[in-house]
Amino acid sequence: MNIIVCLKQVPDTTEVRIDPVRGTLIREGVPSIINPDDRNALEQALKIKDSRDDVNVTVLSMGPPQADVALREALAMGADKAILLSDRAFAGSDTWATSTALADGIKHIGDYDIIMCGRQAIDGDTAQVGPQIAEHLDIPQITYVEALEIKDGRVLANRALEDGYFVIESEMPVLITAIKELNEPRYPSIRGIYEAHGEDKLVVLSAEEIDADFDNLGLNGSPTKVKKSFTPEARKGEGEIFTGSTERAVNNLIVRLKEKHLI
């Protein structure tokens, strides 16, 4: 069984800062990590590998050369091989162009039974790339997976809802997007760290090498156009503190909200 896990390296922060002049994300001084949901996807792939003797796990990412740090960490956790798609042709990709490149990379790999992705990336929160990859490859997909089982050559998954879950069964190949409730990611082992850096298990491929669809790559191939990025200015003005008993404070608050036509 061959499992491909798609990973993204993201800034280790939820406090996004925007350059007021360029309108771009400020990444300087912010360390990078494996996207949290992608770690859950990787952990699930490794758990399947631990339970069987015939599983090979390949991690795949698209990004600049420094994204190899995240892939090395994935190798240290137990992945068998890592592939980085790195090319200036990928620069400026939106979710459509990103999923196109990753799908082309998966086609280049060729043999796969399960594709694992995180639900969404913390620097975008779109939850679009995983499902788009499945559409590019024309395979089934199960999103928001909180429990997963391989049974009789098929995948059985619990797809999370707000108040419960669906149980969904699918044939393979299939794409899965993981949420944090699926598992608790492991830490890399000392031996794993040594082997990930001592033996070259990481392959870097260009757009041409994976026979990518150049018409749907990068900024020019991205249908999403960002007109402007900015940080909203903080509202000025002093708040009002209500004193006295709880009942009196609540009554005064209700009066103020009614005056402002908020209730």
Image (tube, grey):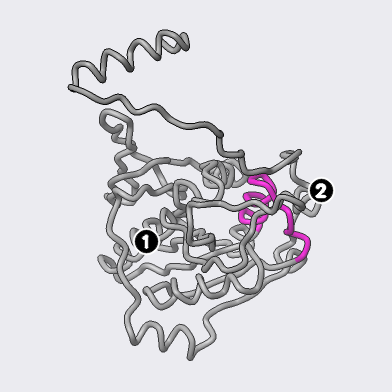
At 34% from the left edge and 39% from the top edge, which residue is drawn?
Answer: 169
Whole-percent x, y for residue 38 in the image: 44, 57
Cα distance between the residues tagged 1 and 2: 34 Å
The numbered mark at residue 108 is none
> Over which residues does the magenta segment extend?
88-104
Give the number of the mark in front: 1 or 2: 2
Q: Identify the image quadrant of the C terminus.
A: top left
Question: Residue 110: image x %, image y %?
Answer: 58, 61
Q: Residue at x 48, y 52 (%)?
A: 14
Residue at x-position 73% and y-position 54%: 92
Q: Quadrant of the N terminus?
A: bottom left
**Do callouts 1 and 2 mark residues in contact (Cβ within 8 Å)?**
no
Choose the circle earlier in sequence order: 1 or 2: 1
Q: Is residue 168 above or below residue 185?
A: above
Relative depth, front residue between 220 and 248: 248
Mark 2 = which residue? 220
- The vertical placement of 92 against 135, above or below, is below
Which mark, by number, is residue 45? 1
Three-letter amino acid code at the position of disc 1: Ala
Question: Is most of the magenta stretch helix, strand or loop?
Answer: helix
Quick check: is 97 in the magenta stretch? yes
